[in-house]
Amino acid sequence: MGAGDDCNHAGNMELIKFALALLFVIIEFQQDAMTFSSLRPPNSHLQRDDFVTEAVQSNRQANSVVALFKAGDENISPVRKRSESKHLTGAPPTGVSCTSIADSLALNVNEIQEIQMQKKQRIMISSFLALHHEIKELKRQRQNIPAVVSTANEIWDVAVQYFRLVRQSFHPNSRQFQVVRAMMAPDVVYNCEYGFEAIVQSWCFMQWFGNVEVELENLKMCAGNEMIATTRTKVTITERTLANVFPHLLNSKLSNGTTFSSLANKLLGQRLTMRGSTCFRWDGKKNLVVSLVTQSDMLRPLVELLESLDDVSRVFEQAAISPSFQWRLTL
């Protein structure tokens, strides 16, 4: 190998080194471009004055290098040419378009906003339907209020008038008697009997007790146009009571008078307090009371008084009244 060949080989090596350096600079520029914001031009760093000057100088040097490279290219083997060409031109792209990333993000944001909007619409529709149903229910309740209030007022008035008459001992000549009678149906049910006369007869029997007091404690409106009155009834057992209500307790061995058994003596003069109730049933079409059921617990005070179930059983055995203070006889 002569001196000329050595010079050509040295020139080719310098050319290859310069080409590799230029390729490295180009790759670095591509990587820097990917790090810039999408709002900043990708080539803004190329617009600086110092870089423009360097680029011009590099361009001039590159042109001279290309000329030298072409001049010495004939001395390079074909295999080496293909290897260098592949090394210079086969580098894959290292960056992704900033515009495509921005478009993808915008698309995702729009999809999320659309999903949120659909969810809000479903919630609003559900709330609207629930509100509509509630309005219909309130309208229905409002329409039913007048009828319920009217019925409650009427049956309340009946109960008040009835117990006012009770305090007057059901005097048949009183104005209150006529008022209560007008509020009752002709075939009103009173316990197990029918008619207003059954109510009057019950109060006639009540006069066999002494000092009768009926206290109204509470009124409660129930379903089915019914009203329950809670009562407290107080009566005194007198000689008249024993003779008419408990005649089986009497001992008539003496011809000049009546003597009482020991059990009757225990009852005589005792004042009993009984808890009870009265149920009024109102007919809204007739505007009348169609049923009246009363009861009082006479069993409990007698058990407390006599302290013997056998004695209590004997008292009610042939009595004209039941333990629930219901009359067993008619006049």
Image (tube, helix red, strand yellow):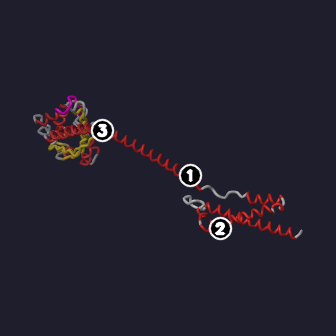
Is residue 107 one of those drawn in magenta?
Answer: no
Q: Is there CB contact under 8 Å for labels 2 and 1?
A: no
Instruction: Tell me if mark 1 has few (under 14), some (14-19) or many (20+) residues whose alpha carbon lies within 10 angstroms of its own.
Output: few
Q: CA distance from mark 2 to mark 3?
A: 102 Å
Q: Quadrant of residue 222?
A: top left
Q: Is residue 69 above or below residue 153?
A: below
Amino acid found under the numbered disc labelled 1? Asp
Is residue 185 one of those drawn in magenta?
Answer: yes
The stretch of residues the image draws in magenta is: 181-190
Amino acid found under the numbered disc labelled 3? Ala
Which numbered marker is on residue 103? 1
Whichever of labels 2 and 3 marks the residue nearer the N terminus, that label is 2
Of circles 2 and 3, the one toward us is 2
Q: Is residue 40 above or below residue 119?
A: below
Of circles 1 and 3, the one toward us is 1
Which numbered marker is on residue 115? none
State the predominant SS element of the stretch in magenta. strand
Seen at 65% across and 63% down, the residue is 29
Q: Quadrant of residue 232?
A: top left
- For disc 2, the marked residue is 54
Residue 307, x across and y down, in percent? 27, 48
